[in-house]
Amino acid sequence: MTGNHGLISLVESRSREQSLRQADRGVERKLDALNFFLADVRDGLGPYLAIYLLTERKWDEASIGAVMSLAALAGILAQTPAGALIDRSRAKRALMVAAAIGVTAASLALPFIDQFAAVAATQVLAHAAGSIFAPGIAALSLGIVGLSAFAARTGRNEAFNHAGNATAAAIAGLSAYFYGPVTVFWLIAAMALASVAATLSIPRQAIDDQIARGFDHAAADDAALRDQPSGYRVLLSCQPLLIFAAATVLFHFANAAMLPLVGQKLVLVNRNLGTTLMSVCIIAAQIVMVPFAILVGRKADAWGRKPIFAAALAVLALRGALYPVSDNPYWLLSVQLLDGVGAGIFGALFPLVVADLTHGTGHFNVSQGAIATATGIGAALSTGVAGFIVVHAGYDAAFLFLAAVAAIGLGLFTMLMPETAPYQGRSRETSKDRVPRVMSPREPAR
């Protein structure tokens, strides 16, 4: 009888473990769906805004750049508060649903207005609401899978995000070809509804709120850890975070304006196919991003963060230098494939570096927001400065300027940034420059 009871207990235990694994896989598939459908919502109209204003509203490049810069600045101001809100809130799903509705409402209003102030206001609202998505996705992911599986999960997040972007861009390109650029607005609305459904499908009990904000359970009740610096104080108190923030500013300054400028050049070649050609650009880059995001998720621990991010900066500089070689649409589309390499790496790597440096502090998301604020400065300035250069010196000068910024970022990052990856597969002696996380006030220096 004892043997039978032992056998029954073993069978029941294995059955429970199998059920838990199946439940975990089910939640991760829901995260996959959320990343897929949110892909077209989190950036609002993105580069389609430039095409729409240029072709439908007949705006000049400087005005387009000004609107995009104002919108990006609004996103900057919202980043750190959004991260702090995600850290503190136990209603992360509700926040993401509200943000998706806000972005969609702002986008759907655009076809009915033409004045500069009104258009700028809608995009300011969209970018402010969209600041919730990045820390929200990161928090849900970390709270569901934990730190040990976070690298693989971020790669998977980015892969599904890029797959969603490619799918949406394909639909936008085909629908715009037959029905005009206005169909992009309705596509965002449909994807927003799907993202809301995906968000609400994730069970509330599957999210560990302490892990989601960067605590571990051993430290979650430590009052001293709860007093860790947050927001800009975290950024300013940790030199590696400062260096990484500076590198991301330069990365986005060099990157943000490139795709809109390519779209404008394609429109000047063929105005009737501007939106469709922009969709081809996006699809091509997103297809490349998927395998690179997966690769980063799988190899970031083994290879280290530093060489991978340095490669992203090098590819960005090369991309900017290649655009001026020819105005041929096929050449521009071919060079745009390199965007998939840089963006695929950055999207998967950014939350990993922040998690490395803030683990145990409880301020993972607000630290993401603080660095994203600095990053957003680069993106906001990029479109405005590039538009000014185009008006006064032409597209080639703008691309070469952006390439030079990326090259400067590569040099500074390579010289100053230490490795932040864990010691997996390496001894401390071979990892001397690896940076420990932000320490507790009572934790001795290593």
Image (cartoon, helix red, strand yellow):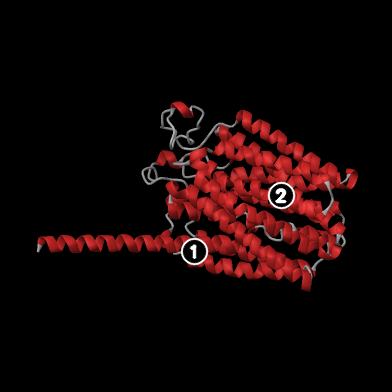
Front in this rendered view, residue 435 or 332: 332
Residue 411 can be seen, yes or no: yes
The quadrant in which residue 119 appears is bottom right
Residue 204 can be seen, yes or no: no
Residue 57: x and y in percent read: 85, 64
Query: Identity of the amino acid at label 2?
Result: Leu
Front in this rendered view, residue 219 or 24: 24
Looking at the image, the residue that sits furthest to the right is 392
The residue sitting at 64% across, 64% down in the picture is 167
Query: Which residue was labeled with disc 1?
Result: 30
Left or right relative to 386: residue 42: left
Residue 24: x and y in percent read: 41, 60
The residue sitting at 69% across, 68% down in the picture is 171
Front in this rendered view, residue 398 or 426: 426
Counting labels gives 2
Q: Give me the C-alpha separation between circle 2 and circle 1.
A: 32 Å
Identify the mark nearer the N-term, 2 or 1.
1
Left or right relative to 81: residue 408: right
Query: Identity of the amino acid at label 1?
Result: Lys
Q: Secondary structure at mark 1?
A: helix
Q: Secondary structure at mark 2?
A: helix
The residue sitting at 57% across, 42% down in the picture is 231
On screen, residue 140 above or below 191: above
Residue 206: x and y in percent read: 42, 60
Image quadrant for the C terminus? top left
Residue 73 circle label: 2
The local crowd at label 2, few if under 14, some if 14 to 19, many if 20 or more residues have their Cα within 10 Å, is: many
Residue 320: x and y in percent read: 76, 43
Residue 85 circle label: none
Front in this rendered view, residue 65 or 440: 65
